[in-house]
Amino acid sequence: MNTSDGSQLQTFPRRLLAHGQARPQRPAFREKHLGIWQTWSWLEVNAEVRALACGLASLGFARGMNLAIIGDNRPRLYWAMLAAQCLGGVPVPLYQDAPAADMAYVLNDADIGFAIVEDQEQVDKLLELQALCPQVRHIAFDDERGMRHYKQAGLNSFAALQALGRAWDQAHPGAFDAAVAAGGGSDIAIILYTSGTTGKPKGVCQSHAALMAAGVGGVGFDKLTDREDILSYLPMAWVGDCLFSLAQAMVAGFTVNCPESGDTVLTDLREIGPTYYFAPPRVFENMLTTVMIRMEDASTLKRNMFHHFMDVAKRCGADILDGKPVPALDRAAYALGHLLVYGPLKNVLGLSRVRVAYTAGAAIGPDLFRFYRSIGVNLKQLYGSTETCAYVCLQPDGNIKFDSVGLPAPGVEVRIAASGEVLVKSAATMAGYFKREDATAEVIDADGYFHTGDAGMFDSEGHLKIIDRAADVGKMDCGAIFAPNYIENKLKFFPFIKEAVAFGNARKQVCAFINIDMEAVGNWAERRNIAYAGYTDLAAHGTTYDLIRDCVEKVNADLAGEALMGATQIHRFLILHKELDPDDDELTRTRKVRRKFIADKYAVLIDALYTDKASQFISTQVKFEDGRVGVVSADLRICGATTYPAMEKAA
């Protein structure tokens, strides 16, 4: 199939039909169900999508309507996206873990009348919202467990909806094909709602042409083929999953594999052994944490061997991966390390077959980035946003820099405004925010450049460096640049630190909140016979503070060696009594810190950090998974950290 033929293959439904003809028996989707992998070929997917689209048509779904998609990554939910597009409609994926009240905003804002969801949990949420969202008249569900006694009007199983569709297709010959033929590249292909770090989420309208430009560009850049395997486990409402599991999959025709559940992702990852892998930094952080926990529990011999060969990998592994010259002795030591450590480690992580791995969504710490590349995982960064189909910069093989996000992607123009903001112009830029012309005009200027809100700069070789969100970058009293995300990523490299929030804008010094990683610190505490009752108790323990202070001081030593960042060493910190949580509005659904909200909510703690106080009492309201509200109180200790003389700036 000619993937560059824009005239014939300008929409995803047309791509679907072409794959059914070009590679009918190749696996298109897999899903693990009850421990067994189920496979659907491209020909079978064509039939499934056609039946579903006709089922929607039989209920009145038509061109210009929006279809809500809610659930974990499931083949049938991806098919629902394609089915809506076949009819000229627009899929609107929602975060499946969002509480009902958050869903109500999107359902109403996007004028949702039809929804296809995963299971009973999501059906219950929508039924609960009937009074707030009366326009949602039709709901179809994939998993029929627990649904036997649900008799509400407008409620159908996925299978029943397809049965309606097959009958409708026979009664309306040619209608489906005419609907697909009527679609064009400028039609809206999907609406993705932003995470809402600074306000209510906005619906980003991406056309078929925009997503296709990003898909074709990425597939060509990394030489992807229809033989790739990916594991689709990240939220379907996130632009990263839309790019990899929909746009690139429909361009290249590779196989999308869906895990059995969120709890089995790592097991399923090892079973599939993807060749092409994508994860945000937090997933790579969690993987590294798991490795470090296992090493702590290993024998002295294994632990020493691991650390010895990791030193070798740190010295030369990334250069070997990039094909750069490496001394023969180092190359021999690395080969032995691959046999004894790196190979088994990649196998345990499920990364043995990975040819290309990407991370995005948040900045990744250079140390974390270096770790994976040093053991032979071709991990690269991409830079983009929901508004640009996650397609702005890519890192070419053999030209990777740990402190950059790469070069502008094919077909993308990037420039830096006088203010330092990154501006982007490409075919992958959004059509606009849904029903928000005012907000669209604020971010896309008269010349067609999208204002990303990120502060960045180009290095001497044209690689883009992202400093931080432009709104988050500030200055300390001494005049030094304060980039909180940069500091936080260094902290989160340590397996014991799950989340961090740094403060320092218009201040004399930097201070920080720390969230411990319960699994890593809990394992560390148990091996030392330290008793604790739960997160709050463990976070307040004196030995935990000693452990975290050691991590903070190592970050300070690292910062001291950087001319631009030496003044941003952390002077004081505290360990929060609770984990920052999206349900408490402290993080977005993609786990980005809502800085202003945290600054307001924990103002008393920030004030205490910048006084001579040794502790501060706080009482915080929290939301539980079942909807109940509770209060967590604690007297938080404030701890000082050693700082080091900073490297002088070059003249």
Image (tube, rainbow, N blue to C red):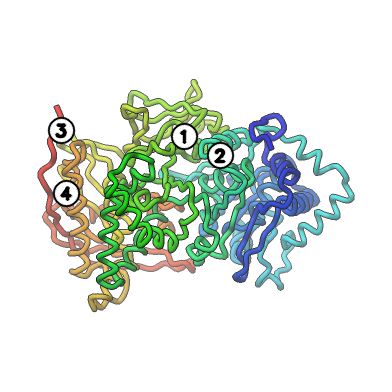
> Which labelled disc corresponds to residue 45?
none
Q: Secondary structure at mark 3?
A: loop
Pick the front one: 628 or 393: 393
Pick the front one: 278 or 337: 337
Q: CA distance from mark 4 to mark 2?
A: 41 Å
Q: CA distance from mark 4 to mark 3?
A: 16 Å
Q: Amino acid at mark 1?
A: Val
Q: CA distance from mark 2 to mark 3?
A: 42 Å
Label 2 or label 3, whichever lies nearer to me, is: 2
Label 1 or label 2, whichever lies nearer to me, is: 2
Q: Residue at x 51, y 42 (%)?
A: 202
Q: Amino acid at mark 4?
A: Ala
Asked if residue 57 lies left or right of residue 414, the reply is right
- Residue 88 locus on image (x, y percent): 72, 40
Rendered position, 413 above or below 575: above
Q: Secondary structure at mark 4?
A: helix
Quarter residue 253 falls in: top right
Locate the C terminus and report the quarter of the image it occupies. Answer: top left
The residue singled out by tag 3 in the image is 649
Choose the circle earlier in sequence order: 4 or 2.
2
The residue singled out by tag 4 in the image is 557
Quarter residue 582 falls in: bottom left
- Residue 118 locus on image (x, y percent): 63, 61
User: Around disc 4, counting alpha carbons within 10 Å, would you say few (fewer than 14), some (14 to 19), or many (20 or more)?
Assistant: some
